[in-house]
Amino acid sequence: MWIRATMTYRTSFLIAVFGNAAGCLLDFVAIYIMFRHVSVLGGFTLPEIALLYGSCSASLGLADLLLGNTGRIGTRIRDGSLDTMLVRPVPVLAQVAADRFALRRLGRVAQGLGVLVWAVSALDVHWTAGRVLLVPVMVVAGAAIFGAVIVAGAAFQFVAGDAAEVQNSFTYGGNTMLQYPPGIFGKELLRGVTFVVPLAFVNWLPALHVLGRPDPLGLPGWVAYASPLVAGLVLVPASWAWRAGLRSYRSTGS
């Protein structure tokens, strides 16, 4: 329904998609301007940074497109409008995700993929079959990991009432962090985003393998291909948290 409503005014939709892409692209423009004054950042060249930026931006864009509206669950919990979704023969998560579905978010996906394609064409690496396959797998698995974080954040709102900004700190904040080389961050942070909230599997670990660079934590080489497995593992507790949140919901009491 929301897609049909959006496509009723196609010129407006195209302008919205372009505006969304242009707004998101400003992050990479800032990185590009930075490289006008330095040749490397954390030992990474501009195309290597572009690989990090494009992959995580496309992953977050896909997750945000499909599940981004779950951040509004706090409002429905407070005003009791979640009750109407509970009586429909459709999973509540699907209804929440589809509520006010914003197709304009394709702009973030498009600009992320555009930067990623440029990075792949500009990189000076030996492209083996494994490295070529790892690039799309990295984007899809990264989207699943971001999606798990979004669902877990939405589940937390059943307890906190409204914690959308907490969720954003891990999604948008994590996306900003993943745009830069892992070597510029402290080891404690790297361990946290590898073993606690595994955002490092979104693009850092696969990208380091593609670029032929060592992992700062000294992990074995096979972890570069573990992103799909990690995505599946984090989706399980996220789904459990969501179901627990739904079971604890008691409406507004009014």
Image (cartoon, grey):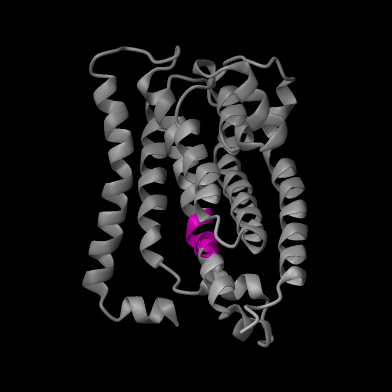
Q: Is residue 164 magenta?
A: no
Prevailing secondary structure class for the magenta stretch in the rendered image = helix
Q: Would residue 246 be found to the left or right of residue 212 on screen?
A: right
Q: As displayed, is residue 215 above or below residue 210?
A: above
Which stretch appears magenta? 63-71
The single residue placed furthest to the front in the displayed view is 254
Quarter of the view holding residue 132: top right
Q: As displayed, is residue 209 above or below residue 80?
A: above
Q: Is residue 68 magenta?
A: yes
Q: Does the image show residue 215?
A: no
173 or 38: nearer the viewer: 173
Q: Where does residue 202 sit, x and y in percent of width and height? A: 59, 38
Residue at coordinates 56% horizontally, 72% vertically from top-left? 78
Numbered circles on residues, count: 0
Quarter of the image with the N terminus is: bottom left
Quarter of the image with the C terminus is: bottom right
Q: Where does residue 79 sit, x and y in percent of width and height? A: 53, 77
Q: Would residue 116 be found to the left or right of residue 154 on screen?
A: left
Residue at coordinates 59% horizontally, 62% vertically from top-left? 161
Q: As displayed, is residue 83 above or below residue 198?
A: below
Q: Does the image show residue 248?
A: yes
Residue at coordinates 62% horizontally, 17% vertically from top-left? 187
Residue at coordinates 50% horizontally, 74% vertically from top-left? 99
Q: As displayed, is residue 53 above or below residue 101?
A: above
112 or 60: nearer the viewer: 60
Q: Would residue 123 be found to the left or right of residue 200 on screen?
A: left
Q: Where does residue 150 sit, x and y in percent of width and height? A: 59, 54
Q: Where does residue 35 sit, x and y in percent of width and height? A: 29, 19
Q: Would residue 105 be found to the left or right of residue 182 on screen?
A: left
11 or 122: nearer the viewer: 11
